[in-house]
Image (spheres, rainbow, N blue to C red):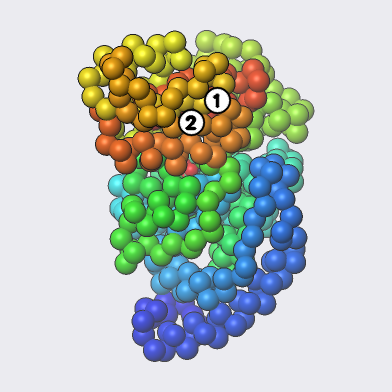
Amino acid sequence: MLDRAGTIGDPIASEVLYALAKSLFVVTNRRIACLDFGKTCARTGVSHTVDGKPEQIAEAVLRLRSGGLVAFPTETVYGLGADAMDEDAVRRVFAVKGRPAHNPLIVHVAGEAMAKSVAAEWPEDAQKLAKRFWPGPLSIVVPKKANVPQIVTGGGPNVAVRCPSHPLTLALLEAFGRPLVGPSANVSGFVSPTAAEHVREAFDERDVMVLDGGACTGGIESTVVSVVGGKARVLRSGLIDAGVIEEVLGREVECADSGRVSGTATTATPMDAPGQLSSHYAPKAKAVMVEAREVEDVISRARGECVLITHVAATSEPFPQPLPSGKGLSGHTIQMPGDANGYARRLYAALREADAMHPTLIVIVTPPDESTNPVWRAVRDRLKRATAEE
Ligand code: TXA
Ligand code: MG
């Protein structure tokens, strides 16, 4: 009945919107009850609050039903949502992002039942992982059903599905009742958005409606794990580490970004991971990653304003803010948290802050390796791509 409803400004649509908003109150409230709002998320340690935004969810549903785009908050980064089953809508997502057509999109679902509606198979591995980590920052790649448009998977036979944990987006998925594609809501190749403001800066509001769910608590994109063909392979690292996935599956997991098999470094070539482009998540300014002892040298050779991104444990003496001039140093320091989750949460906002100062160079002190916390692996992966040459 509401399919292809008119634009929001039109009076008939406004009435429909009002009716839908009222009924969504019920949906949202039920969701609130299910999700136990106000509780602290065990994984991120941060509490979510959503004071029910039924009118906005109703407007978002109308937009999605008429093939429009809605950016939604998740616990990782903001996603650029469209009806996953609407080929034209998905084409619009690729167009506004400037995303290469071969790079597949993650399909966001309200839970396992919706995941199965796009999966040709739901292997036991997928079931175990979904039970343990959903809703949460894990995307699971499984064989796709024929009903999923080819454009969603970049022409490939498999689909990545994820059930995000942000209550506002779960309420949206339930109200919409269908899966949503959701690449990070940034122009392709640039820094991912961790606040609604970042999305508004990137896209025209006529093209993209933004559901504001506050700052993202995780800060880096989901772990992508493929369970196709009976093999478990981490294609993109994230807040959920390969080690925990191994514990859940009770066997070895390969890692595309390190050649690692069950904790052992190997010389295996990186496996097929579409879209894992080397330069990605990148600020506009040139950025480099260096050891703490190299910082002074690199900054003095840069001959211009630099922004230094360091972290509390990087040096025994934190770099001063602003950097002292005179020793060839000039510019600003952004001090990051010394813990891996705190660093991940701040990472993209820090890259944006650094970029906004239009420096000659962004100098990032290499963070610790994963020996103290596996989340550092994902942080380093993003920094490697942010500092990679095109
Ligand atoms: O946390 C996240 O995953 C966020 C939020 C919004 O959910 N989304 C996100 O989407 O980061 P995107 O498009 O920026 O990154 C998706 C990654 C890409 O590296 C893509 O190649 C991979 O997932 N991917 C998607 N579908 C795939 C598939 N069928 N097979 C293998 N890799 C896939
Ligand atoms: Mg992205």
Q: Is residue 143 visible?
A: no
* Element class at badge 2: strand
Amino acid type indicated by mark 2: Gln
Q: Dot 1: few (<14), some (14–19), or many (≥20) neighbours within 10 Å?
A: some
Q: Tell me what residue is drawn at x 66 percent, y 73 percent.
A: 27
Residue 151 picture location, percent across and down: 40, 50
Q: Is residue 184 above or below residue 258?
A: below
Residue at 58%, 42% in the rendered image: 218
Q: Residue at x 63, y 52 (%)?
A: 165
Q: How far apart are labels 1 and 2 at the CA level?
A: 7 Å
The correct choice, above or below, for 272 with respect to 186 in the image is above
Say if mark 1 contacts mark 2, CB within 8 Å. Answer: yes
- Name the secondary structure under disc 1: loop
Q: Which residue is mark 2?
A: 335
Q: Is mark 1 within 8 Å of ligand 1?
A: no
> Is the shortest distance between ligand 1 and the CB of mark 2 under 8 Å?
no
Choose between 115 and 295: the one closer to the eye.
Answer: 295
